[in-house]
Image: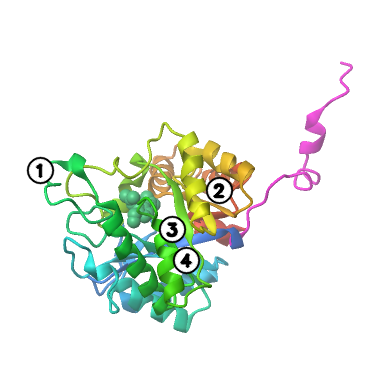
Amino acid sequence: MDLTHRPRRLRRDGIRSLVSEVDLSASDLIAPVFVDATTDERRPIESMPGHERVPVDEAVTRVEEIRETGVEAVVVFGIPDAKDDQGTRAWADDGVVQRAVRAITAETDAYVITDVCLCEYTDHGHCGLLEDTAAEEPELTVRNDETLDLLGKIATSHAEAGAEMVAPSGMMDGMVGAIREALDADGFTDVPIMSYAAKYESAFYGPFRDAADGAPAFGDRRHYQMDPANAREAMREVALDVEQGADVLMVKPALPYLDVVSAIREEYDHPVAAYNVSGEYAMLHAAAEKGWLDLEAAAYESLLSIKRAGADLILTYFAEDVADRL
Ligand code: PBG
């Protein structure tokens, strides 16, 4: 054969890594941590093998374990001691995230990000204040503007506890602006906001809702999370968040939405984050358990693909395992 172009020339060992277009490094990864105020021992999360809910006392130890793998950043989720219709434990000074963050920032060098949302703290499990009749008429859903004040309070209480970055995940309209304003008013002008800018109403959150005990008691989240059919809408969501001062733009979930990651990458100069969610983790584990795929290779390939699509940061339950091998 008289072939001029032979792409295989560049695939041999030795040259292969020299021409690779993206790389994965531990400093790209953010590990989720679940701190549980209802327990005094570490509890495995069944649907997320290798992950646990840890009591506040163990939060520092948990973060140190993560740091040992080379991962430098964590995102903290809380399971509160009590829930009510407003989610008041979400902004309590002695709340689970506030206590954990105080300890983690005092005793480790981890970069601490907090999830700012109400769904783990409300007894109805929705991400904001509900209309009074919502239980009978679930389509009436969450009161957007009243919820914004609460998100501002949660964010400042996290910053007061020492959180270095806040990540609002509730998909309320105007949440980034409201949080920016609240943070600035309290002097936290240097705390950046990583917005869950394009967060889809996804079936891939299943295991997380067990882990964080945040499943809605009735109805679903279609009234505030995005329709998986929509990519152009994601660009509008992102534009609004940029306008309101978002510092980092997140897409969630990651693998089913790589087109969205790459569209945002093309259009914006902001750092782009992707959340490789609980279901993306659980499905690889389940398949590997059956011997149907190689877990390490599949996890690495997933994260590499997310970077190739254009993400700079990846929130992932694989952070420790992958970082350990890099
Ligand atoms: C809401 C929140 C959720 C996740 C992160 N923040 C759950 C939801 O919207 O139902 C999901 C993360 C995952 O599945 O790993 N506070």
Please determine whether, in this image, residue 297 is positioned above or below residue 124: above
Q: Which residue is mark 2?
A: 303
The mark lying in front, picked from 3 and 4, is 3
The mark lying in front, picked from 4 and 1, is 1
Give the dominant element type of the magenta stretch: helix, strand or loop.
loop
Q: Secondary structure at mark 4?
A: strand
Q: Which residue is mark 1?
A: 136
The mark lying in front, picked from 4 and 2, is 4
Visible residue check, residue 58: no
Q: Indicate if the residue with disc 1 has its beta carbon within 8 Å of ligand 1.
A: no
For marks 3 and 1, give the CA distance: 30 Å
Q: Indicate if the residue with disc 4 has its beta carbon within 8 Å of ligand 1.
A: no
Other-residue count near label 3 (Cα within 10 Å), few / some / many at <14 / 14–19 / ≥20: many
Picture quarter containing residue 96? bottom left
Image quadrant holding the C terminus, namely bottom right
> 296 or 144, which is in the foreground?
144
Residue type indicated by callout 3: Val
Q: Secondary structure at mark 2?
A: helix
Visible residue check, residue 175: yes
Image quadrant holding the N terminus, namely top right
The mark lying in front, picked from 1 and 2, is 1
Residue type indicated by callout 4: Val
Residue for point 36% across, 74% down: 157
Expressed as whole percent of the image width and height from the top left, the position of residue 108 reads: 49, 79
For marks 1 and 2, give the CA distance: 42 Å
Residue type indicated by callout 2: Leu
Q: Which mark is residue 176?
A: 3
